[in-house]
Image (spheres, grey):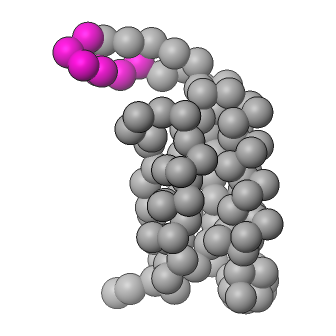
C-alpha cells in the first residue's frame, strides 16, 4: 500500500542549521511542518572510525510526492558531506491533520 504522506527524519550539526533547513522547506511548501528536537547524542562509523557527536534531529511532515524534492533541497542546504535524511511513509493519521498537511504543501 502506498501512502500519500510521509515524514523525513534528518540530523543536523546545530540548532541554527536545523532551523535554516526547516524554515526553507516550510517556506517553499516542501513540508507543512518541521519539528526540531535535540540535542541527540550520535555514535556512528565514519571513514573507518567510530565517531561521537551531538546533533539536532528534525522531523518534516509532507506529501510523499514531494519527498524527492525535499531530499534534494535538504542536501543543498546541509553542511554534511553525507547527511542523514530518510523518508518514512505515514500509513495512517487523523484525517483532519492529513488534510491540513496536504493543503499546506499544495
Q: Dominant secondary structure of the magenta stretch?
A: strand
Answer whether residue 17 is magenta in the image: no
Q: Can residue 90 be seen in this view?
A: no
Q: Which residue is drawn at 69% across and 36% down?
A: 17
The location of residue 23, given as percent across then percent down, is 78, 55
The location of residue 14, given as percent across then percent down, is 68, 27
Quarter holding the N terminus is bottom left
Q: Can residue 42 be seen in this view?
A: yes
Q: Residue at x 49, y 60 (%)?
A: 71
Q: Quarter of the image holding residue 62?
A: bottom right
Q: What stretch is highlighted in magenta?
A: 43-49
Does 10 sit left or right of 95 as displayed? left
The location of residue 28, given as percent across then percent down, is 73, 70
Work out whether residue 102 or residue 1 is closer to the camera in this orientation and state it: 102
How many numbered discs sit on the rendered protein?
A: 0
Q: Residue at x 76, y 88 (%)?
A: 103
Question: 98 above or below 56?
Answer: below
* Identity of the residue furthest to the left in this view: 48
Does 91 sit left or right of 101 as displayed? left
Q: Which residue is drawn at 69% across and 62% down?
A: 25
Quarter holding the C terminus is bottom right
Amino acid at each position: 500500500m502506498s501512502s500519500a504522506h510521509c515524514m523525513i527524519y534528518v540530523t543536523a550539526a546545530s540548532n541554527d542549521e536545523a532551523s535554516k533547513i526547516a524554515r526553507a522547506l516550510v517556506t517553499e511548501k516542501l513540508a507543512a511542518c518541521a519539528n526540531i528536537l535535540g540535542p541527540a547524542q550520535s555514535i556512528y562509523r565514519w571513514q573507518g572510525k567510530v565517531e561521537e557527536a551531538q546533533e539536532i534531529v528534525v522531523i518534516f511532515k509532507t506529501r510523499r510526492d514531494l519527498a524527492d524534492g525535499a531530499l534534494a533541497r535538504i542536501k543543498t542546504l546541509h553542511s554534511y558531506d553525507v547527511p542523514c535524511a530518510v523518508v518514512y511513509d505515514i500509513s495512517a493519521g487523523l484525517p483532519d491533520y492529513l488534510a491540513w498537511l496536504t493543503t499546506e504543501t499544495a
